[in-house]
Image: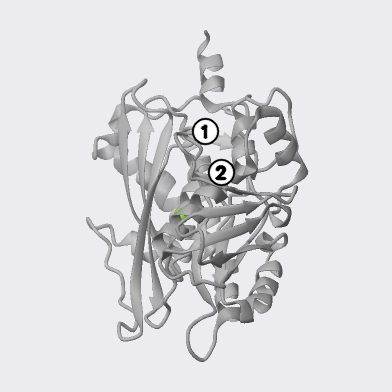
Amino acid sequence: MSEEQQAFDFLGAYCPIPLSHSEQIIIGHGSGGRLTHELIQRIFKTHFANPLLEQGDDGVVLPVMNPDHFEIVVSTDSHVVSPIFFPGGDIGKLAVCGTVNDVAVMGAKPLYLTAAFILEEGLQVEVLEYIVSSMAKTAREAGVSIVAGDTKVVERGKGDGIFIITSGVGIRPKSLQVSGRNAQIGDRIILSGALGEHGVAVLQARGNLGFTSDIQSDVAPLNHLIASALEAGKGSQQNAIHTMRDVTRGGLATTLNEIAAQSNVGVLIEEAAIPVNETVNSVCEMLGFDPLYMANEGKCLFFVDPKRVDQVLEAIRAHEYGRQAAVIGEVVADPIQKVLLKTIMGSTRLVDMLSGEMLPRIC
Ligand code: MG
């Protein structure tokens, strides 16, 4: 196989970059010496530019904001998606959204990210730069700064191009009680949009569909949508939103089971109310997948006091990432710690967590 063919296979068919020359990552880029410094200066500091990153120490010093009223939320996530480019996104966008969303569903305003890169010797520098610029663009949309980072290089064949680990820091008001442990009987469950688009987009990028579709991954930073929902849920006492969680790998079924167990409640959902777009539906039918287990990277669940659910739903639908939001079910006392689905046919069945791995390396 020629070098070019290898590079093409390595990137997958969805690489948006016409590679013009062949500058590659070499082991020395991870040495901590001159080459590392040049790479940091040229790629990372250029795209992520901000005063905190410029501090240049072993750690970054972050200002403490009003410690009497806010607490700090931290989350971390590693990203190993294969291939690194897929319709609607790339590993860089995913690495920012994954962590921004995990901080945001805690009810926090995400402020800072750190990013660690594990690069494989032979990765095209242009590809790295494209991914870094995609991260910078997504971070700008989310309103977060990338304030610290690390780069390591592993030998050819011992990585898969690029892995990215991001950590996020956010602040939330001490009065906010949003948690997976806080879902309450009677809460209505809002899903912010249609299921399965990220899963199908990655399948398409892998060439596993056997045809091409118009599908795009839903990968998106949800923090602004979540902030609008929290604003709409504000009340004199507790916020009307009790629980939020992004629906990622494992799909809706797994996320709902997690919350039912954590909050010690039951969940009843209605199949007819769950938004699934046409392409995802037909792909699932053809390949024998269930949309309830398909991965998403831009969808969120909200457990909301029934008295305020209309306002919260309206606020979510007003946002570009929430247009298809719907109330899909409610929290019930029985069956405790389980998820019950009322099917389109009118019967009911228990919906379990995903067992095993349906699609490895989806995120
Ligand atoms: Mg999450």
**130 left or right of 170 in image:** right
The residue lying at 70 percent from left, 67 percent from top is 317
Helix, strand or loop for disc 1: loop
Instruction: State which tag comes first along the sequence, 1 or 2.
Output: 2
The residue type indicated by label 1 comes to Leu
Q: Residue 281's spot in the image, x, y percent?
A: 72, 40
Q: Which residue is mark 2?
A: 295
Picture colour scheme: one colour
Q: Nearer the viewer, residue 284 or 20?
A: 284
Q: Is residue 47 left or right of residue 220?
A: left
Secondary element type, mark 2: loop
Task: Please state which amino acid type lies under the numbered disc 2.
Answer: Ala
Disc 2 residue: CB within 8 Å of ligand 1: no
Query: Which residue sits at x=71%, y=33%?
Result: 285
Q: Is residue 133 visible?
A: no
Asked whether 69 or 261 is in front, the reply is 261
